Amino acid sequence: MSLTGTIQTARSALNAAQIAIQVAGNNMANAATPGYSRQVANLVPIPGPRSDPFHIGRGVGVGSVERKLDEALRARLRSGISDEFGAAKRVALFNQLEGVLNELTDFDLSTQLNEFFNTWSEIASVQDTQSVVIEAGSELANFVRTMRQDLHGLRTQIGAELTNAVVRADELLDDIASINKLIARTEVGPSEANTLRDQRDRLIDELATFMDVTTIEDGQGNLDVLVGSAPVVLAGNSRGLDLIYEEIDGERVPFVVVESDQERLPVTSGTIGGLISARDGTIDVAIADLDQLSAQIIFEVNKLHATGTNAGGFTVSDTDQQIPLPDRSLAYNDPNNQTFSDLPYAAENGGFYVNIANDSTGSTDQVWVDVDLDGLTATGAQGFADDTTPEDIRAAIDAIDGVNADFSPDGRLSVTADPGFAFSFSDDSSGVLGVMGMNAYFVGTDAKTIAVRPDLINDPKALAAGRIVDGQLVENATSIEVAHLQETAFAALGNRTPAQFWIDRVQNVATAASTANSDAEAAQIVRESLEAQNAAVSGVSIDEESINLLTFQRQFQGAAQLITVADEMYQTLLGIL
């Protein structure tokens, strides 16, 4: 090798050491930078010419400066990030839900139910306490309505968070697509745009906090992003995200879709996945449970109050249910009867008595009103043509001497006694009076609409605390029957009492909350473990970079010394000549 070749070899070493020192220095400068991946200068030997019999080589070069990372590990880390954020969001929402339910305190629904039914027990033994019962019903109704409003408010909050999360995720997709374009333009030749790639990775990591994603590199520097099997970023184009709602069983259900073609995305984790699962599987279930319990309490109390009476009987009684003209001629069990088909309770086969008291004679007559709701026609075929309609009930009552029945202009069935007569109802085995809300105690059909009938609030004496038993008035019989509802198991509540039903539901929430906490803790441990593994590969060690810095410094010094020696030899040679 000539002296000139020696100097060129040393020069290559100087350049390589200089680049390697710059890389080590950049690593040390970014040791605390979030998302920074350690870079490595890959040194490669420069082969000598074929004419060199010893194949010594012509020094060293920098083949590339690349990031140290494990793509498979990064993919697992992103999955861990999604799982952790989804679990954390579910835990936060469960904590808020438990705060709304507030069970096992002195201000919870279980306590309100006990106080309500206990008040009916008190009126059964103490006279002239009707106003106390009305007040207890109002307090229960107000409590239930407030709880449902709070649950609905929590669902509204989730909706707002969901909207914001989808908007931010859509912005991240746009940013990722833009960086894809920059990287594709920048990476001309073997070099990589490491800073841009780190920036893109940070964006994808942030995207993983919102939803579970996977990535595929296309070999040209572009990174395609997928949710499930659906691509949301293709090279330099974002397909966009959108949040839509669809009506399913009367509820607005959210779906995350691709904006370009409305393809549904299977988002199961991340903040968005956690919000959707908490909304659909937790908040909506709690609202449905509260509505179910409220509907059953309304129906059962109203059934008893409809067949209750007082010492004087009634001269007028109306239904709370308003029945439009087309529905009056349709059977109660006809699916086309829109007034009754959507109610959370229904009438059944049976009937009831109308008790007519004649003030002038002091006599009382009982007239049976049959209610046919077997869903069969006179020929035995399936159908509702021969089943009882609201008009049939009106006509049957109106045909009884001493009372009149008609529909008011707003569609309520109104029963009025003739002068000198009074009436009451008893032994309703069909529940049709409770379904219509005849002489109702509660109005409404669910937790949102439950309330005590306004005219009872205005006139507590109208409370029907007694009832006809074996043809005789027992003045506190209805109060006793309502009080016993607290201990009655209902098929509509899964053969549980109202208190048992609600406690079971609250326990389900507590169990789910405990599971969510365990899942969140496990997800955090997994994410921390994966993050530690990733840091071991891609993180910067100051000690390691300090050693590298010293190594390349020595290399630089050695190359410089080689140039000095070669120069001295060259000068000596020139002096000889």
Image (spheres, rainbow, N blue to C red):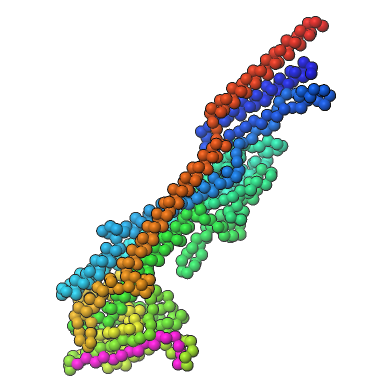
The stretch of residues the image draws in magenta is 363-378
Which of the 4 image quadrants contains residue 472?
bottom left
For residue 383, side relative to residue 25 (left or right): left
Between 269 and 162, the one lying in front of the other is: 269
| Camera-nearest residue between 460 and 98 | 98
Query: Residue 394, can we see it?
Result: no
Q: Position of residue 463 (x, y in %)?
A: 23, 76
- Is residue 409 within the magenta segment? no
Classify the position of the N terminus by image quarter. Answer: top right
Residue lying farthest front?
54
Q: Is residue 374 magenta?
A: yes
In the rendered image, which quarter is residue 387 located in?
A: bottom left
Q: Report x, y in % for residue 462.
A: 22, 77
Give x and y (percent) for residue 276.
Answer: 48, 57
Left or right: 559, with 462 as reference point: right
Q: What residue is at 70 percent from the left and 16 percent from the top? A: 562
Q: In which quadrant of the rendered image does the C terminus lie?
A: top right
